[in-house]
Amino acid sequence: NGPNTIDSPPLNEVHYQPFDVSEPFEDKFDLYTLTGKYNFDSFQLVSASAYWDRQQNQTQDISEAMQDYIGGFFGPPASWPFSSTGTVTEAGNTWFGLGAGTITEDDYTRQFSEELRLASTGNDPLQWLIGGYYSSFGATSHVYSFYPVAANGFDADFGTTNLADNHRKVDIDQYAAFGEVSYLLPDHFKASLGARYYQYHSNSVTSVSGVSANGTSNPLVGLAQNSGVTPKLDLAYIPDDNTTVYATMSKGFRPGGPNSPIPVPPCPSAAPTQFGPDSVWNYELGEKLRFFDSRVSVNGAIYYEDWTGVQQQVAPKCGFKFTANAGKATVYGAELEVAVVLVPGFVLSQNAGYTHATNSTTLPAAGVVDRKSTRLN
């Protein structure tokens, strides 16, 4: 009852499974939150704390994948035998089939976060909010694949049972300070201006061994850090309690991080040691309307987004993956939401949206070839 990676031998689309390999899967997490509020005369203090940890264990059948991958190095993959006692002669050498194979991944992640903010209360024309944020994230991952000790099969072919034994530890600390002010202008206009300063530090330690590591065994260290400011500007027209028309310009980001090193060879070149943050400028026009004593609401928006430094997974043919900043992308679309209160407590709603997203630069290694034919994934 686990996920499949490959479900047919090479050059054959028939549903086929050479070995009945158990594929257990388990995923457990704990989540704790605590929110506290204190009201002063003209502002409110809020503290929001959270902690979670997650343990995930899974095993997958890789018999067909390795038959194709390793068989392809020495000759036609389709002629490589599945049975560990079967043999094939390729390039003047005799090889055993690999037999049943599995790969197991054990992951543990945890994160603590804390946000403190002060926000004005009341109905004064000037409203404000300031705050700070901190989070500490840690993750460990163990990915391993060992074949049986035997006089044939994988052990006899390579002189070891270790296909892969990879350990990785990642820690990310993030800090942020943010604030926003808004002011009610004449003629029912309201202007808001906000900004968020962020900083993060990330480090990773990776050790790999086994046939797939091509002899690499020393611990490899990755470091990444960055900081910046994301602003927000909003102008709204609010003639009454049932009507809001607004225009927003804002910027968002995702932190970067270190890459796990990849072996060279079999890969043609090393992966970058880290990938940077990506950012999005968002431009939006929208409205929020209510009719018939608020029994009908219509909310709509159109938007355009300019995405820079897109974080894209790169998968060279050598079988190892890393993350790179793959240039730019553009996104535009529209959203519409209609809700009707049929009777008190019973609401009928309908949403519709359209999004058009394309890459605007190329990264062939990630399958991003040209902006007109490659849609953003």
Image: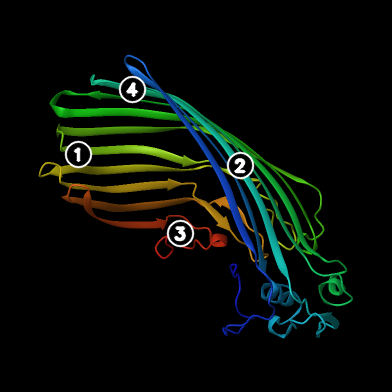
Residue contact between numbered discs 2 and 1, judged by CB atoms under 8 Å: no
* Residues packed near mark 1 inside 10 Å, few (<14), some (14 to 19) or many (20 plus): some
Q: Which residue lies furthest to the top in this view?
A: 41
- Describe the element under mark 3 as helix, strand or loop: loop
Q: Which residue is tagged 1?
A: 245
For the residues labelled 2 and 3, the Cα–Cα distance comes to: 28 Å
For the residues labelled 4 and 2, the Cα–Cα distance comes to: 33 Å
- Residue 80 at x, y percent in the picture: 74, 82
- Residue 283 at x, y percent in the picture: 31, 42
Q: What residue type is labelled 3?
A: Asn
Q: Residue at 70%, 48% (x, y): give it.
A: 168
Q: In which quarter of the image is residue 123?
A: top left
Q: Nearer the viewer, mark 4 or mark 2?
A: 2
Front-most of residues 342 and 186: 342
Q: In which quarter of the image is the C terminus?
A: bottom left
Q: Which residue is tagged 2?
A: 110
Q: Which badge, 2 or 1, is on the more N-terminal residue?
A: 2
Instruction: Report the coloring of the rendering.
Output: rainbow
Q: Which residue is tagged 4?
A: 128
Residue 362: which numbered mark, if any? Answer: none
Q: Which of marks 2 and 3 is in front?
A: 2
Residue 309 lies left or right of residue 6; in this view the side is left
For the residues labelled 3 and 1, the Cα–Cα distance comes to: 31 Å
- Residue 65 at x, y percent in the picture: 67, 73
Q: Which residue is tagged 3?
A: 377
- Describe the element under mark 1 as helix, strand or loop: strand
Residue 353 lies left or right of residue 65; in this view the side is left
